[in-house]
Amino acid sequence: MEVTNKYIVIKTQIDGKPQESDFELKTEPFSLTVKPGSNDIIIKNLYVSIDPYQINRMKTMSSSQKASEFAIGISPGQVIDAYGVGKVIASGDPKFEKDDYVVGIISWGEYSISQGFILNKLDPMGLPLTYHVGLLGLSGLTAYSGFFEICKPKKGEKVFVSAASGSVGNLVGQYAKHFGCYVVGCAGSPNKVKLLKEKLGFDEVFNYKEETDLNSTLQRYFPNGIDIYFDNVGGEMLEAAISNMNMNGRVALCGIIAEYTNAGKRAAPDLLNVIYKRITIQGFLSGDYMSLFPEFLTMTIDHLRTGKIHVLEDVSVGLESVPSAFVGLFRGDNVGKRIVQVSLD
């Protein structure tokens, strides 16, 4: 059987801030039948993840494209692979059967063909499928591994989280609070500030857009210094955080969205602080810590079922909404994990 598959591509390389006009919806014939002898898995895409790191794949050149198989460059007109949840239509791979739910690398399209690369059967466990795209997917693993494995927290330590209402930041803050840390976050609107304090339980939250001197702001919220900084932003925020770190402070570099589309915002932290305060700064990718997935899943599901973790999701409907959902990330439109529902189960 053959259908028409719709999918999203870039028209040209994107070296600045993305615009919806940089993308287009394409169509092509797509077979729902597996060729004899093939181990292809044909997937109906249900939910796809919208992540800011993808902009680095869309650039003419980015160092990230050569550093990770997850970040290789995307050419104009090429199918864009992305993390998500789907349902098997047909399979030549004995590990997957028709109607299995799967989670892993699919595409910004209605259908995907996979050879099983970063693809697993999914047991929804009675939870919404969207949870497995964000909270129980790579966003959650990023928050868990970055906080517990890289930052190695101690109870009572003082934690600062930037982009705290984002898909990773909100979870870091919640993990830190339940672990017994003092947690301050920053976000870009009064509504986000209120949400983080009143619903997620952050000790303090500030609107960075209302602050003219980030260094003084952090001194105000951390009069005794910062022990852990979970960085999703880079730029001036990273500089200010380093200036306010305590001895043996730890910094987990998760993302630098402030720098993705503006080369003029490169962070220049005071390296004397780094040396004399013995500050550890480590960049990481969630794929580095897949071995932690079982323990991450166990803890997070337990927190979820006992009401200790709140889920923040921002779900758009329809494949056509992918460009606006992606562009909105760079305006700070989203609250929590941004996901697009491609089709109904």
Image (cartoon, grey):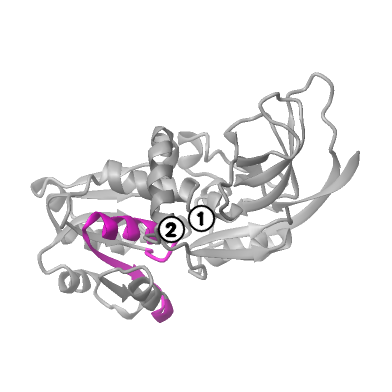
Q: Quadrant of residue 42?
A: top right
Q: Amino acid at mark 2?
A: Ile
Compute the Cα span from label 2 to label 1. 7 Å
Whether the magenta-drawn stretch holds residue 171 is answered as yes
Q: Amino acid at mark 1?
A: Pro
Whether the magenta-drawn stretch holds residue 56 is answered as no
User: Picture coordinates of residue 312 (x, y %)?
Assistant: 48, 64
Q: Residues within 10 Å of mark 2 (few under 14, many from 20)?
A: some
**Outermost residue, top side:** 37
- Which mark, residue 257? 2
Does residue 296 appear to the left or right of 245 in the view shown? right
The residue closer to the viewer here, 79 or 205, is 205
Q: Which residue is mark 1?
A: 52
Q: Earlier in the sequence, mark 2 or mark 1?
A: 1
Does residue 231 appear to the left or right of 127 in the view shown? left
Residue at 40%, 74% (x, y): give it: 195
Residue at 64%, 40% (x, y): give it: 102
The residue closer to the viewer here, 310 or 238, is 310
Residue at 37%, 64% (x, y): give it: 164
The residue closer to the viewer here, 303 or 89, is 303
Kind of element beneath mark 1: loop
- Which mark, residue 312? none
The reply to whether the C-beta atoms of the residues labelled 2 and 1 are less than 8 Å apart is: yes
Q: Quadrant of residue 294?
A: top left
The reply to whether residue 19 is visible in this rendering is: no
User: Picture coordinates of residue 161 (x, y %)?
Assistant: 31, 61
Q: What range of the chain is rendered magenta? A: 163-191
The residue closer to the viewer here, 296 or 285, is 296
User: Picture coordinates of residue 148 (x, y %)?
Assistant: 29, 45
The reply to whether residue 73 is visible in this rendering is: yes
